């Protein structure tokens, strides 16, 4: 299978525009990870694909549970980030606790938000699972308030599912 990175500029102003973007991202990601089982390579390319395709981002990357109580920074794109996050702290740690995606319209309103980049205004965090257990999260930050919504949570979740399948092969 060959891989081709789309040069399309995507809009995020309507649910339909976002759904088109996520359909294209699913296709590109499927080609990118096809036949590759290395988790670091796949998560690094995943972060790069999302960061370089989705408009309005200032950070995109992974945190992985290294113990039951602590997330550790994984492959990412953007400014240097917080390295360790305790389970239950911030949006990432809370996502691990809840086991479901969290959309934050204004990070300044989220109790216990961890400000790794003072320019971030909104955030989307999606859990990553392997064999039914949460193993980490994929985190997106934006300098724009209200950048993310349920369409984004569903779209990023669909991409994470493609990535999770590389663990099972």
Image (cartoon, helix red, strand yellow):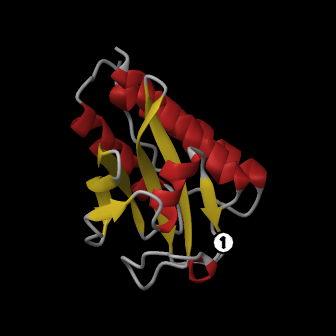
6 in relation to 30, above or below: below
Q: Is residue 161 left or right of residue 42?
A: right
Residue at point 50% right, 44% down?
127
- SS for dot 1: loop
Task: Find residue 60 and report its image quarter.
Answer: bottom left
Residue at point 25% right, 64% down?
83
Of 68 and 131, the residue lying toward us: 68
Q: Quadrant of the C terminus?
A: top left
Quick one: label 1, few (<14), some, or many (20+) residues within 10 Å?
some
Q: Is residue 88 left or right of residue 65?
A: right
Task: Find residue 119 and report its image quarter.
Answer: bottom left
6 in relation to 51, above or below: above
User: In x, y percent, where is residue 115?
Assistant: 42, 79
User: In x, y percent, where is residue 13?
Assistant: 73, 64
Of 72 and 81, the residue lying toward us: 72
Query: In this view of the protein, can residue 46 be seen by the observer?
Result: yes
Residue at point 35% right, 23% down?
167
User: In x, y percent, where is residue 25?
Assistant: 52, 40
Q: Residue furthest front?
A: 69
User: In x, y percent, where is residue 125?
Assistant: 52, 55
Query: In this view of the protein, can residue 8 be seen by the observer?
Result: no
Residue at point 64% right, 52% down?
152
Give the number of callouts.
Answer: 1
Q: Quadrant of the N terminus?
A: top left
According to the picture, the residue beneath numbered tag 1 turns out to be: 105
């Amino acid at each position: 299978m060959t891989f081709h990175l789309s040069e399309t500029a995507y809009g995020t102003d309507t649910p339909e525009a976002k759904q088109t973007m996520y359909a294209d991202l699913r296709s590109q990601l499927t080609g990118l990870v096809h036949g590759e089982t290395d988790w670091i390579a796949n998560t690094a390319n995943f972060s790069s694909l999302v960061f370089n395709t989705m408009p309005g981002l200032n950070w995109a990357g992974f945190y992985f549970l290294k113990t039951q109580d602590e997330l550790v920074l994984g492959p990412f794109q953007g400014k240097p980030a917080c390295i360790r996050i305790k389970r239950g702290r911030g949006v990432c740690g809370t996502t691990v606790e809840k086991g479901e995606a969290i959309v934050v319209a204004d990070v300044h309103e989220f109790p216990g938000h961890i400000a790794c980049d003072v320019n971030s205004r909104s955030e989307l965090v999606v859990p990553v699972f392997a064999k039914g257990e949460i193993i980490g999260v994929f985190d997106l930050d934006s300098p724009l308030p209200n950048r993310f919504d349920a369409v984004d949570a569903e779209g990023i979740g669909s991409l994470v599912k493609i990535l999770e399948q590389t663990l099972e092969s």
